[in-house]
Image (tube, coloured by chain):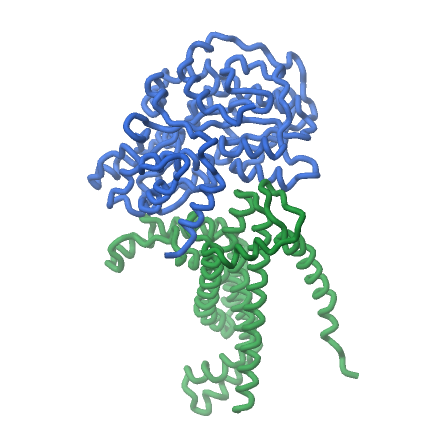
Amino acid sequence: MTKHSRRSVLAGFASVGAVAAVGARPAFGQQRFDGITVRVATFGGGWDKAVHKYGGHKFEDLGGKVEYATAPPRENLAKLIASRGRPVPFDVVEMGDLTWVDTYEGGFLQKINLDNVPNKKELLKTQFDDWKVASWVTQEGIVYNTEKFKENGIPAPERYKDLLHPKLQGKVSVLDISTAGAAQLLVGVTLDAGGSMENIDPGLQLVKQINPLQFWKVGAQAVTLMKAADIWAATMHAGFAVQMRRQGMPVAFVHPKIGASNRGLLKEGWLGVVKGSPQPRAAEFFINEYVSSSCQHGLALERGIVPVNGVARAKLAEDPLLRELFLISDADVGKMVSVDFNKFNLDEATQKWTRMIGTRG
Amino acid sequence: MKARWHFIMAPSLILSLFLLLASQIIFLRGGFFKDLRLGRSGTDLTWENYVRFFSDNIYVDSLVLTIEVSAAVALLTLCLSYPVAYIIARMRSRWSLLLIAAIVAASFITIVIKVLGLIIIFSSGGALNRALLALGVVSKPLTIMGQPGGVVVGLMHFTMGFAVLLLYGVIRTIPASLEDAATIHGAPRWRVFWRVIIPLSLPGVIVTALIVFNLCMGAFTSAALIGAGKVYTLPVLIQQTVIFQTRYGMGATISAVLMAVTLLINLLSLLVVTRLAVARRLTA
């Protein structure tokens, strides 16, 4: 199997609508899950609640119970590592694209019986295989406070380098190397600074020059600072801009220009069934509901992800806010950058990042 | 026959040692194996992780920073806690009990809530910065985020309650009549404090300082939240190494070094204080 399928996302957008008309059949008919608990490792910060509201509750409607273990993907991977030789801590694991390779290579996943995930028909063929099913796509970039920028005469940013504006010193939050979007950020700033996916040094220097107030590990941290106007800009995905706008905050989102012709970055999330799960069928049912059109559409509206479900994706443009904040047209999406994980080395990037931030002088 | 009261300590000492060794032995052992990623370790014993620790700036800098931050917190916390503890210990009204109860209650508040409160207080639009700006004390808002100084403030907030309680207990054991006697014989207030109260409370002060120092050496939450990914103390580095990089061997090595250095500093402090006390007795 291939490690990654970044290009699938591009292909996915280009194929919006092509899969929209395909219907899905119920996964388990009248099967009930009385007395069965499915444990799901996913993101916190309200994401778990949204997943439950739009998809997870269907498992409970059939008599089961869903328990969410919320943490960033790397922490969930650490829990799996720590549980080697013992009962697994959860049945379904949600992974960022940085984490999925390690989770797979560490032998923590078991094959998914895709017959139990009929909603896969509404996904692209590149968005599922025996080991994983795509759960969302996010568009990475810069969220900024339009009022503060206007008040201080700062032009709207167009690219990562624009965060070097003197008035933004100490007013920017950049995501931490341990978060799911770290690869996209580093590749974005690196390409903007003249580096490449194999050589991220120029990007690290750019991050250092930006001199952020904070490296956020949980999105809510940056959102809180943005609300308090302690920061005026943050590198995060468009979904955060959606959430902040729905809360009435004066923010806009920029898909940063990268190089001469590219604009914006893509990140993918994946779902897998944990090897040794005592409830694989329940886990597969949960995954099926997660990628259903109703759940994906709900998550898109409330949390600002780009659905992997074609039916839900086709509806994106109906929402004026999503239309404003997302790149939706085939032409725009075609110019977005995906990280090539055969070139980008996370371990090396982490070492360099820690050295840059943690070393004095 | 003379009672051997120190034997009473034995059960708790044995239990403490057992719990310490049982939990640390895994780390101590793990540090001697090579990391093979994803929590896997090699089978051959090696010093590689220790060599790397002491030859790599990131680890040495982090160790120095951790010691500096912890020492600063211990010193500042003592300076601020001692007067509070003294005043409460010498109060004759029922307010003293109320104040002690308030300090105990405050120490029950989880560190995360305390730290988040600090972040709000120190936010650019927060009450403190508004007041300081209005008074012209500062020209731009103070921030504690991402600064070692901010981590010191956060840790002081965390440890001050413990320090006041410990020092209160120490000062209560010093009879107020000694101060009265010194005063009657004409010693000014500062001299009474310097020559009577401080020397008599010194052992308790040192123990308090070491407890605060030790708490700070292992403190993660304040460093992680207020440090905002920019202040790499050793506990933050351990978390990143173990959780994010899944390099258990290196994480174990950092933990072992942190524990060893903390123990060493404690022993050296006690040694210095003991020598000073002996020298003082001889000169007296």
Q: What color was chain A assigned in the picture?
A: blue
Q: Give the quadrant of residue A187.
A: top left
On the question of residue B175 being in view, the answer is yes
Q: Residue A306 location in percent, x, y? A: 43, 23
Judge by depth and name the residue closer to the eye, A35 or A198. Answer: A198
Q: How many marks?
A: 0
Relative to residue B165, is residue A65 depicted above or below?
above
Say which residue appears at 43% left-offset and 50% top-offset: A355
Relative to residue A197, is residue B144 depicted above or below?
below
On the question of residue B102 being in view, the answer is no
Name the quarter where the N terminus of chain B is drawn. Answer: bottom right
* A199 sits left or right of A94 in the view: left
Supply the letter of whichever chain is green: B
Q: Residue A124 location in percent, x, y? A: 49, 16
Judge by depth and name the residue closer to the eye, B100 or A321. Answer: A321
Q: Give the quadrant of residue B258.
A: bottom right
Say which residue appears at 52% left-offset and 42% top-offset: B244
Relative to residue B122, is residue B282 depicted above or below?
below
* A279 sits left or right of A310 in the view: right
Judge by depth and name the residue closer to the eye, B139 or A339. Answer: A339
Q: Residue B257 location in percent, x, y? A: 56, 59
* A159 sits left or right of A78 in the view: left
Q: Residue B177 location in percent, x, y? A: 53, 84
Say which residue appears at 23% left-offset and 58% top-offset: B136
> Among all residues in the image, which is located at the extreme right?
B1
Relative to residue B114, is residue B14 depicted above or below?
below
Judge by depth and name the residue closer to the eye, B133 or B37. Answer: B37
